[in-house]
Amino acid sequence: IVGSEIFNQLIICAGAVFASRTGSLILNKAVVTREVGFYALGIVLLYIAFQDKRPSPDDVNGPDYIYISFWEAVMVFSGYILYVIVCANMKSVVKWVTRTKEEVGRRLSTLTTSRPNYGTAISKRD
């Protein structure tokens, strides 16, 4: 199930292009950023959840199995709940990100890029 995700994404994108009348797609930058960001978050959460590896209590010398605790499952499920909340409030999220980006840009533009003045070097020659 985990490995099929990238296949599904590629097939759906290719199928959408094939099904379009123009042979190309125009994608919304905010939606693509959201999807890529949550895809990366999902991979990180799965990586964290899959870290608990140990042999079965019945066969100590056997292969290691992956154990996922209740709290690791809650963590992964919370990532999905966050995704649903962001999707449901996408317009508000885009407005907030845009406002924050503009505010950071204004703050950065007030910084001077010139070299600081530490005084004048005085050289004495005899």
Image (tube, grey):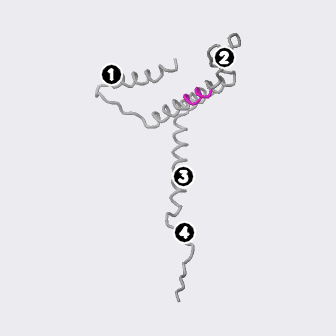
Q: Which residue is mark 4?
A: 116
Q: Tag 1: residue type?
A: Ala
Of mark 2 and mark 3, the one earlier in the sequence is 2
The residue range painted magenta reads 42-48
Q: Which residue is mark 1?
A: 19
Q: Tag 2: residue type?
A: Pro
Whether residues under marks 2 and 3 lie with C-beta atoms below 8 angstroms apart, the answer is no
Q: Secondary structure at mark 1?
A: helix
Whether residues under marks 3 and 4 lie with C-beta atoms below 8 angstroms apart, the answer is no
Of mark 2 and mark 1, the one earlier in the sequence is 1
Q: Secondary structure at mark 4?
A: loop
Question: Separation of disc 2 and disc 1 at Cα?
Answer: 48 Å
Quarter holding residue 78: top right
Q: Which residue is mark 3?
A: 104
Query: Is the stretch drawn in magenta largely helix, strand or loop?
Result: helix
Looking at the image, the residue that sits furthest to the top is: 58
Whether residues under marks 2 and 1 lie with C-beta atoms below 8 angstroms apart, the answer is no
Q: Residue 77 placed where, x, y %? A: 62, 24
Rendered image: mark on residue 55:
2
Quarter holding residue 55: top right
Up-down relation of residue 118 to residue 30 (above or below): below
Of mark 3 and mark 4, the one earlier in the sequence is 3
Q: Tag 3: residue type?
A: Val
Q: Tag 4: residue type?
A: Pro
Q: Nearer the viewer, mark 2 or mark 3?
A: 2
Q: Nearer the viewer, mark 2 or mark 1?
A: 2
Whether residues under marks 2 and 4 lie with C-beta atoms below 8 angstroms apart, the answer is no
